Image: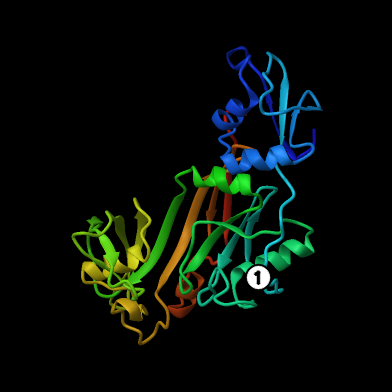
């Protein structure tokens, strides 16, 4: 069986179950994912032979499901651009997104976005035809972006609690680590700003001072929730808006975008079950303040104890 398939040898405890149940319970496939397999001529195989989702499996059967199911190409206009690739394998692509670059087109035929660059790269590699990011970064936030190469991989990754660590340069001095619990809601229905408000959605941010830089504080942050603009709003809420964040009251003297960067990202690779840990240093910060730390990316793999 080639790399386009995931396989499972049926054990006694799974015997006599219908394939649909195994696809849902063991492979964690969504209904859309199961439908795609059903529509593919070789999507679901038992011992090398095509079967339906109603087929009941037996002990020692080998169930194989097609991972790279053909898909309708995206309508986003591709455009070759320089991409900083931090990590790539058969399931995912991880990039260092620069600031000032949105993930998606803002209008029809717009090609000044990360999706256009990734689709051009995939086309050159004869790879996926759809842009499938796992999570989002604001246009003016830099750092790691994880992209799934198939719909099923995107679904599997969405079921995980990805480990993310951000770096941010907050105005003023913060001397102690802490936790911010403050609900976030829309300022108005037509305003893109969010604010802390009692009727907002629960939001929780953990922060830790890392260094003092020119009278400001470099923070390491992680999120227990994922609200829009959460870090930016919470830092403003405690009286230390991010430098360059004109939307939330930050000092824009030196920074012309929010000083926020997704530095670390860890996830379980859905096909190999390896834990992949990525680190992409905050290059703009390093260069602005002539810091001595390395600006090279770091990739670490932890093999699973058993597959």
Q: Quadrant of residue 11?
A: top right
Q: Quadrant of residue 105?
A: bottom right
Residue closest to the far left: 198
Query: Residue 288 at x, y = what percent?
Result: 45, 79
Residue closest to the far bottom: 253
On screen, residue 192 versus residue 41, left or right, reads left
Query: Residue 122 at x, y = what percent?
Result: 73, 61
Q: Quick check: can you spot residue 218?
A: no
Please name the residue shown 51% across and 71% down the image: 283
Mark 1 Cα shell of 10 Å, populated few (<14), some (14-19), many (≥20): many
Please name the residue shown 34% across and 78% down the image: 247
Q: Quadrant of the C terminus?
A: top right
Closer to the camera, 296 or 97? 97
Q: Secondary structure at mark 1?
A: helix
Closer to the camera, 218 or 189? 189
Closer to the camera, 182 or 53? 53
Residue underneath mark 1: 116
On screen, residue 240 versus residue 95, left or right, reads left
- Callout count: 1
Please name the residue shown 75% across and 27% down the image: 51
- Is residue 145 positioned above or below 23 on the image? below
Q: How is the image coloured?
A: rainbow
- Is residue 50 positioned above or below 211 on the image? above
Q: Quadrant of residue 72?
A: bottom right
Query: Residue 126 at x, y = what percent?
Result: 79, 58
On screen, residue 280 versus residue 177, left or right, reads right
Q: Quick check: can you spot residue 49?
A: yes
Q: Quadrant of the N terminus?
A: top right
């Amino acid at each position: 069986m080639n790399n386009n398939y995931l396989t499972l040898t049926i054990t006694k405890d799974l015997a006599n179950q219908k394939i649909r149940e195994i696809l849902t319970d063991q492979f964690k496939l969504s209904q859309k994912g199961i439908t795609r397999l059903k529509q593919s001529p070789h999507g679901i195989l038992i011992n090398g032979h095509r079967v339906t989702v109603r087929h009941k499996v037996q002990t020692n059967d080998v169930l194989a499901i097609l991972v790279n199911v053909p898909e309708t190409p995206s309508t986003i206009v591709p455009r070759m651009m320089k991409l900083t690739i931090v990590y790539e394998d058969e399931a995912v692509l991880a990039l260092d997104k620069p600031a000032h670059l949105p993930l998606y087109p803002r209008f029809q035929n717009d090609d000044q976005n990360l999706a256009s660059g990734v689709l051009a790269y995939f086309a050159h590699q004869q790879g996926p035809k759809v842009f499938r990011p796992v999570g989002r970064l604001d246009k003016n936030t830099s750092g790691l972006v994880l992209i799934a190469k198939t719909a099923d991989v995107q679904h599997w990754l969405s079921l995980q609690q990805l480990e993310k660590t951000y770096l941010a340069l907050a105005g003023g001095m913060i001397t102690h680590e802490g936790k911010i619990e403050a609900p976030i809601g829309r300022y108005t229905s037509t305003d893109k700003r969010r604010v802390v408000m009692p009727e907002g959605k629960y939001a929780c941010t953990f922060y830790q001072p890392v260094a003092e830089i020119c009278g400001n504080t470099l923070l390491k942050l992680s999120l227990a929730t994922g609200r829009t603009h959460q870090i930016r709003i919470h830092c403003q809420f405690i009286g230390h808006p991010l430098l360059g964040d004109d939307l939330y009251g930050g000092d824009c003297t030196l920074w012309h975008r929010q000083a926020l960067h997704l530095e670390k990202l860890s996830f379980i690779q859905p096909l190999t079950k390896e834990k992949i840990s990525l680190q992409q240093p905050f290059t703009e910060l390093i260069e602005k303040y002539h810091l001595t730390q390395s600006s090279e990316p770091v990739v670490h793999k932890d093999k699973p104890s058993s597959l």
